[in-house]
Amino acid sequence: MEPLLRELRIEVNKRCNFACDHCYTDKKGKISSLSTLLGIVGQCAKSGVTDLSLTGGEPLQDLDRTLALIRAGAELGLRVRLNTNGWYADAECLSSLKAAGLHEIQVSMSHSDATEFDRFVRRKGAFARACEAVRQATNMNLKTTVRCTLMNDNIEQIANIYDLVADLGAHSMKIRAIVEVNGVRDAAASIAASVRVRSIEKLKDRVKQRRVPVALADGGEFSLDAASDIERLACKCGDVAVFVTAEGIITPCPFLRENEDFWCGDIHSQSIESAVSSARYRAFVGHREATSDCGNDAGCACKATLVEQLKPSANQGPRHKRLVERA
Ligand SMILES: C[S@@+](CC[C@H](N)C(=O)[O-])C[C@H]1O[C@@H](n2cnc3c(N)ncnc32)[C@H](O)[C@@H]1O
Ligand code: SF4
Ligand code: SF4
């Protein structure tokens, strides 16, 4: 395996108790067996991977499965992170995650107003439970990050969301602009530049006062100057991190997986190592390194690359054609 690859990202399950407006994941269909997933965690640890990132669906809805993966990763010396909506993360659940060896919990919160939050995820009481999860996790000294997806309807609230994150005691905040894939639509692309800049300026002011670290995945749209207190997150897909979908497809990027041309293998028939060394995967990484633009015109703001060498497949969709035309 290439020495730079250091993170394995696994979709633990598909099901979820929320129905967020912006969510790009598929909620239906088969998922890989736990033993297959444990096998790839072992393979990756041997090949020099240092980080395991668990996502879903809602991973805590399948707590035993999630705990088994955390335990396996931690025993192999991996830093294990978990993305969750926080609903099931009560004190007992958090203690079991910590005991299993979880290194960091990342709770998703994209609104600071309870009514807005609950409406957005379509679950009453969701805001209160997410807040409590963050509070409890920090109280038990579990590294806690709040993940926020930036959209048309929350960009002007971003400084308030940051204040909430700081009030709850979280250790850091990660912000990523919405990606319009798998039928997700948002008016984010049409947000006026002046609104983007003003909102981020407000956020910068808050960060100066509250000092909770913030990282933002963007492509320059938010005009972060070099002296900004906000870290800019680069896309890690392909060279640093590999993604495994709930079905077991190996692909560099979670957002590009609707396109079969980005499928580089299947954990049921292939090792991660062989998928990562495949011509298709290497082409993605090579092109991304050369151009630093993935050509994803679906709103992903961290701008990586599209594989120029990819040939259109039999089942290409309209979006694929657009991507190939741009490459
Ligand atoms: C798919 S969720 C799965 C884990 C868990 N259910 C949660 O919400 O954290 C992981 C992260 O992806 C983000 N996300 C979902 N749809 C997105 C989209 N279209 N663009 C960018 N991020 C998205 C969510 O906000 C969440 O922070
Ligand atoms: S909680 Fe996570 S997986 Fe569930 S719908 Fe929301 S973003 Fe998607
Ligand atoms: S920049 Fe491209 S490769 Fe990176 S996360 Fe966005 S869509 Fe994926």
Image (cartoon, rainbow, N blue to C red):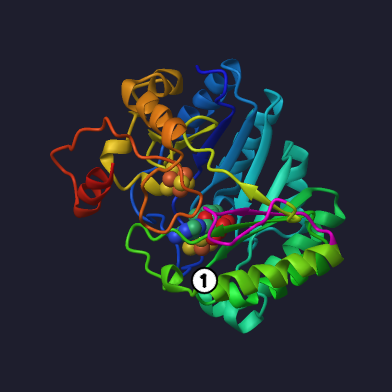
Residue interval drawn in magenta: 211-226
Q: Nearer the viewer, residue 261 or 31?
A: 261
Q: Relative to 185, is 27 above or below? A: above
Looking at the rendered structure, the kind of residue marked 1 is: Ala
Q: Relative to 66, is 311 above or below? A: above
Residue at left 18%, top 45%?
A: 316
**Is 153 a magenta residue?**
no
- Residue 246 picture location, percent across and down: 42, 42
- Residue 56 picture location, percent across and down: 50, 50
The secondary element bearing badge 1 is classed as: helix
Q: Relative to 303, is 299 above or below? A: below
Q: Relative to 285, is 231 above or below? A: below
Res. 123 visible in picture: no
Query: Which quadrant is the C terminus positioned in?
Result: top left
The residue wearing badge 1 is: 193
Residue at left 70%, top 30%?
A: 74
**Is 216 a magenta residue?**
yes
- Is residue 115 toward the left or the right of residue 75 in the image? left
Res. 70 visible in picture: yes
- Is residue 303 toward the left or the right of residue 117 in the image? left
Q: Extreme front residue here?
A: 226
Q: Residues within 10 Å of mark 1 (few under 14, many from 20)?
A: few
- Is residue 107 toward the left or the right of residue 319 in the image? right
| Quarter location, residue 98 | top right
- Residue 207 picture location, percent across and down: 79, 63
Q: Nearer the viewer, residue 290 or 131?
A: 290
Residue at left 17%, top 37%?
A: 313
